[in-house]
C-alpha cells in the first residue's frame, strides 16, 4: 500500500464519519459536550469516532476538529458552558499541548476527560494530565463519559513541573539553532539528504521540548 493510497483511504473514512455525524438524530439528553484535538494534533479519526458514538447515544456534542488553538477553545467553552470537554492526542508533542489545555480548563472549573494512542504507548504520561482518562479502548469511551456525567469527579492533582525542567526548556530553546547548525555541519559529509535531516531535527526537537514541558525527560 502506497502513502497516497493510505491518505486516500483515510480521507474517505473521515468524510464518511462526518456524514454519519451529520445524520445522527437530534440530542435527546440534557448536557453539552465538546470534543477537540489540541494544537498541532491533526489526527482526528478517534475524535470523530467518539463524537459519532456519543451523538448516537443522544448527547449534544460539539466537535471542534483538529489543531484547536487554546483561545478558540476558551471562547467556545465560555459561549457553550459544556458539561465536559474531551481532548484527544496521538503524539508526544500534542500530549504536551493537551496537558496545558487541561491546566487551563481546570482553572476555568470545566471538567475535562482525555484519551489517545500516546497515553496507551506511554501510560506514565497519565500521571501528568489533570483530567479523567477515558481508557485505552474506543469501545469503553462512551460508558466512561456517561459515568463521568452521572458522577462528576474531582480532577486528579498533578505535581507542578519542577523549576529545573523550566530552566532546561528555556536553555534548550535558546540553543536549538546552534545544535541544528552543528548537526548540519557534521552530517553534510555523510551523504544524508537535507530533507531527511530536516525532518529528523524537527521531530527530535519537538519531542525533547514536549518531554521538558511534561516534566519527565
Image: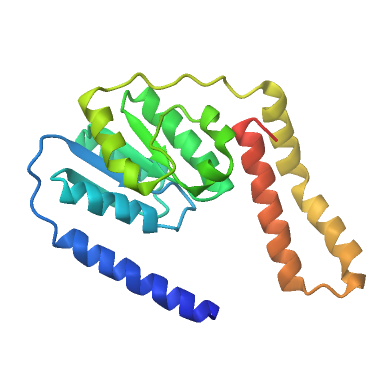
The residue lying toward the viewer, choosing from 69 and 18, is 18
Expressed as whole percent of the image width and height from the top left, the position of residue 179 reads 82, 51
**Left or right: 202 in relation to 25:** right
Residue 89 vertical placement versus 161 (above, below)? below
Q: What count of labels does the image hold?
A: 0
Expressed as whole percent of the image width and height from the top left, the position of residue 121 reads 57, 45
Expressed as whole percent of the image width and height from the top left, the position of residue 94 reads 52, 47
Q: Which image quarter: residue 12?
A: bottom left
**Left or right: 139 in relation to 39:** left
Q: Which image quarter: residue 169?
A: top right
**Left or right: 101 in relation to 179:** left
Q: Which image quarter: residue 107?
A: top left
Residue 36 vertical placement versus 10 (above, below)? above
Q: Residue at x 82, y 72 (%)?
A: 192
Q: Residue at x 41, y 47 (%)?
A: 69
The residue lying toward the viewer, choosing from 207 and 194, is 207
Q: Which quarter of the figure is the C terminus placed in?
A: top right
Q: Residue at x 82, y 58 (%)?
A: 181
Q: Residue at x 43, y 36 (%)?
A: 101
Residue 40 vertical placement versus 134 (above, below)? below
Amino acid at each position: 500500500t502506497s502513502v497516497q493510497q493510505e491518505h486516500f483511504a483515510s480521507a474517505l473514512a473521515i468524510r464518511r464519519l462526518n456524514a454519519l455525524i451529520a445524520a445522527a438524530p437530534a440530542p435527546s439528553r440534557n448536557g453539552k459536550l465538546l470534543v477537540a484535538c489540541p494544537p498541532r494534533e491533526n489526527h482526528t479519526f478517534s475524535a470523530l469516532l467518539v463524537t459519532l458514538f456519543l451523538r448516537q447515544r443522544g448527547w449534544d456534542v460539539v466537535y471542534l476538529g483538529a489543531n484547536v488553538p487554546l483561545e478558540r477553545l476558551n471562547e467556545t467553552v465560555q459561549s457553550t458552558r459544556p458539561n465536559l470537554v474531551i481532548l484527544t492526542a496521538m503524539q508526544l508533542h500534542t500530549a504536551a499541548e493537551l496537558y496545558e489545555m487541561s491546566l487551563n480548563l481546570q482553572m476555568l472549573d470545566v471538567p475535562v476527560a482525555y484519551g489517545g494512542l500516546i497515553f496507551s504507548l506511554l501510560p506514565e504520561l497519565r500521571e501528568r494530565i489533570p483530567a479523567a482518562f477515558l481508557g485505552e479502548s474506543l469501545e469503553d469511551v462512551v460508558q466512561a463519559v456517561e459515568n463521568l456525567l452521572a458522577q462528576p469527579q474531582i480532577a486528579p492533582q498533578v505535581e507542578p513541573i519542577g523549576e529545573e525542567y523550566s530552566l532546561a526548556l528555556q536553555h534548550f530553546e535558546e540553543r536549538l539553532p546552534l545544535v541544528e547548525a552543528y548537526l548540519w555541519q557534521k552530517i553534510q559529509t555523510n551523504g544524508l539528504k537535507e530533507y531527511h535531516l530536516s525532518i529528523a531535527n524537527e521531530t527530535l526537537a519537538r519531542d525533547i521540548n514536549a518531554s521538558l514541558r511534561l516534566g519527565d525527560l
